[in-house]
């Protein structure tokens, strides 16, 4: 790409950045937690349509994706799960096609009194935008869209097909991205601007979600010895799962991308509930668990070990051996994915193009990082033979209180994304 085009793209990103921040603020104001994404998706669809893109907006059909690799089981209804894709078709295709993917769903805000300001009333202060989902990952959606805007402001469009995806369900299953694949959206590469501080993600972990259901014998607390406390019965099972977590993290089990990390895999008991009355011995308990796994670690084998660990611990418990737990899988059934293991020419070329774009935008070489989370990159890399580049702005307290995103980092990522699109897809005059 010629230097003058790089300069022009950077200049138009700068010129339009106040508008981009206003867009991000408006998008962040939509409380798009799972099941409540429709208003945010309406906003995205209208913005794409206003720019002249063909807009595909559809409700995800679970039956249509259940059989596909990467599907994660769901417990709730899907009538409210809607994807939006903006489609650019090149007039004279000459370059390489691209998916610009981002998720619109955000995690719950938690207790509002633990935020300094309301989570869905975004504010800008000292170069940061605060608000739930501003970093994870609506800033990325904004950078994708405004990178395309920058090309248009230069009188250019990508010389290849580009699919701008705004998907749901990333925070709990990934089925939104899977539904895009099932609908036929494929490309030569995918770019996903998750907030990992302007680094290229070389590897990501897999994740399994499951629930453990325990049943006890109700009794008045005065006769607690005659009952079985289902909540307390959970404790030895949780201890056994943490012992398994320790074994999985052993040095001999770590792939190369994670060899330097002592504890990459984390088990989290994210929710526990049980009982019906303070003076009654609880007759039931359910706890929810998130467990990570390494790239290349088979999900079925991991599930077999999880089940064995829980049942072995239950059989050592006086109550549980007569009332074995029930394990219910819901949400993430996500395999790990390592871009570093993709030796294809497409992957090498995409990484080189992003490296050059990042260096032009920041003056620095593109750093690499293996992360201890999961993203939708796995669908493209594992199931569609598509190198997935995860590269986005710097954000802090994602999934926490006072989530915020660094606006200057968003500006740099938008410039880099615009240059990457121009290089990867080529350009044609509008």
Image (tube, rainbow, N blue to C red):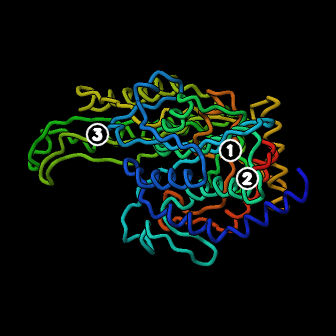
Counting other residues with Cα less than 10 Å from the Cα at mark 3, is it few (<14), some (14-19), or many (20 or more)? many
Label 1 near label 2: C-beta < 8 Å?
yes
Q: Secondary structure at mark 2?
A: helix
- Residue 345: which quarter of the image? top right
Residue at 12 percent across and 48 percent down: it is 280
Per the image, the residue denoted by label 3 is 233
Residue 173 visible, this orientation: yes
Residue at 85 percent across and 62 percent down: it is 7
Q: Is residue 80 left or right of residue 56?
A: left
Q: Is residue 381 left or right of residue 220?
A: right
> Residue 34 location, x and y as percent?
40, 48
Residue 191 tag number: 1
> Residue 215 location, x and y as percent?
22, 35
Of pointers 1 and 3, the one earlier in the residue sequence: 1
377 vs 152: above or below:
above
> Residue 336 location, x and y as percent?
60, 34
Per the image, the residue denoted by label 2 is 417
Counting other residues with Cα less than 10 Å from the Cα at mark 1, is it few (<14), some (14-19), or many (20 or more)? many
């Amino acid at each position: 790409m010629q230097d003058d085009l790089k300069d022009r793209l950077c200049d138009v990103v700068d010129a339009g950045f106040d508008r981009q921040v206003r867009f991000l603020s408006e998008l962040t104001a939509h409380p798009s937690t799972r099941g409540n994404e429709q208003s945010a998706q309406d906003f995205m669809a209208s913005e794409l349509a206003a720019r002249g893109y063909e807009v595909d907006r559809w409700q995800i059909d679970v039956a249509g994706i259940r059989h596909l690799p990467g599907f994660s089981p769901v417990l709730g209804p899907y009538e409210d799960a809607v994807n939006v894709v903006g489609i650019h078709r090149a007039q004279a295709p000459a370059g390489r096609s691209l998916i610009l993917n981002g998720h619109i769903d955000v995690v719950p805000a938690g207790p509002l009194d633990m935020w300094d300001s309301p989570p869905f009333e975004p504010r800008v202060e000292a170069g940061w935008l605060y608000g739930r989902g501003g970093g994870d990952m609506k800033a990325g959606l904004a950078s994708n869209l405004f990178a395309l805007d920058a090309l248009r402001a230069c009188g250019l469009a990508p010389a290849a097909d580009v699919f701008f995806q705004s998907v749901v369900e990333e925070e709990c299953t990934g089925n939104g991205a899977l539904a895009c694949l099932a609908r036929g959206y494929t490309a030569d590469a995918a770019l996903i601007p998750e907030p990992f501080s302007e680094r290229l993600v070389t590897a990501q972990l897999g994740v399994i979600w499951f629930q453990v259901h325990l049943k006890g014998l109700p009794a008045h607390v005065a006769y607690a010895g005659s009952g079985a406390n289902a909540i307390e019965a959970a404790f030895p099972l949780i201890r056994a799962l943490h012992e398994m977590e320790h074994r999985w993290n052993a040095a001999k089990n770590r792939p190369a991308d994670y060899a330097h990390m002592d504890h990459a895999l984390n088990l989290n008991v994210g929710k526990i509930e049980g009982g019906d009355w303070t003076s009654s011995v609880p007759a039931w308990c359910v706890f929810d668990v998130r467990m990570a796994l390494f790239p290349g670690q088979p999900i079925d084998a991991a599930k077999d070990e999880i089940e064995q660990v829980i049942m072995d611990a239950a059989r050592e418990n006086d109550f549980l051996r007569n009332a074995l737990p029930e394990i219910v899988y819901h949400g993430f059934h996500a395999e790990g994915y390592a871009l570093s293991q993709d030796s294809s020419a497409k992957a090498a070329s995409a990484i080189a193009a992003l490296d050059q774009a990042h260096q032009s935008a920041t003056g620095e070489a593109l750093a690499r990082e293996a992360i201890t989370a999961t993203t939708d990159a796995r669908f493209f890399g594992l199931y569609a033979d598509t190198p997935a580049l995860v590269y986005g702005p710097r954000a802090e307290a994602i999934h926490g209180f006072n989530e915020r995103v660094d606006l200057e980092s968003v500006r740099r990522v938008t410039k880099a994304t615009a240059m990457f699109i121009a290089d990867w897809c080529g350009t044609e005059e509008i």
